[in-house]
Amino acid sequence: MRKLLFIALLLFGCTKYEEGPWLAFSGKAERIAGDWQVKQAFDLEGNNYFLLFKGLTFSFEKEGAMSIRFDKFEPAETISGSWEFRDQKEGMQWLLEADSTRLDTLRFPYDSLAVFDILRLDENELRLIDEENRRIYFGH
């Protein structure tokens, strides 16, 4: 009985991310892989930043490649880059292959290098917080 309780505490008593999940059956890189759209973006004061991300699709590959497709332009534009976990997989960062002039033209709210803490990572939801305490919630 004590062994069962100990195992339950190990599985459910600690989590990598502040907002879960408490239990996952796939690896973190597998969960982040795929196409994501921003569903919500706001700061702790309640300011809404969603429109900065409307029409963008973020694609992450398990091996570390990524791209951002800007569907809000005709024709759509894509920027490639790479991503990686940081701080023992408690955060992530990306490095885009674009200079600040191109990112400004696309009205993208981040520099080519952006760093985030991960709040939640499951198969259907990715929640990040950036260095300015803006929360970005992604979904498929």
Image (tube, rainbow, N blue to C red):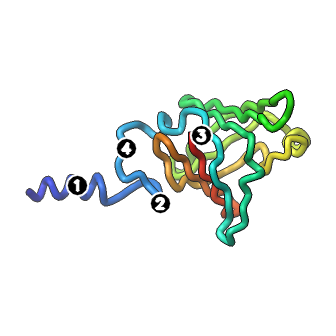
Residue type beneath disc 1: Ala
Q: Which label belongs to residue 24? A: 4
- In the picture, which quadrant includes the C terminus? top right
- For the residues labelled 3 and 4, the Cα–Cα distance comes to 20 Å
Query: Of discs 1 and 3, which sits in the foreground?
Result: 1
Along the horizontal axis of the image, is 9 left or right of 82? left
Q: Is residue 74 above or below residue 1?
A: above
* CA neighbours of label 2 inside 10 A, class few (<14), some (14 to 19), many (20+): some
- For the residues labelled 4 and 1, the Cα–Cα distance comes to 14 Å
Looking at the image, do the residues carrying marks 1 and 2 touch, with CB atoms under 8 Å apart? no
Q: What residue did someone put label 1 on?
A: 8
Residue occupying image coordinates x 66% and y 32%: 66
Q: Which label belongs to residue 18? A: 2
Secondary element at image label 2: loop
Residue occupying image coordinates x 48% and y 34%: 30
Mark 1 or 2, nearer chain start = 1
* CA neighbours of label 1 inside 10 A, class few (<14), some (14 to 19), many (20+): few
Mark 3 or 4, nearer chain start = 4
Q: What residue did someone put label 3 on?
A: 84
Residue type beneath disc 4: Ala
Along the horizontal axis of the image, is 58 left or right of 102? left
Secondary element at image label 3: strand
- For the residues labelled 1 and 2, the Cα–Cα distance comes to 19 Å
Residue type beneath disc 2: Glu
Query: Of discs 2 and 3, which sits in the foreground?
Result: 2
Looking at the image, do the residues carrying marks 3 and 4 touch, with CB atoms under 8 Å apart? no
Mark 2 or 4, nearer chain start = 2
Q: Residue 100: x percent and y percent?
A: 87, 44
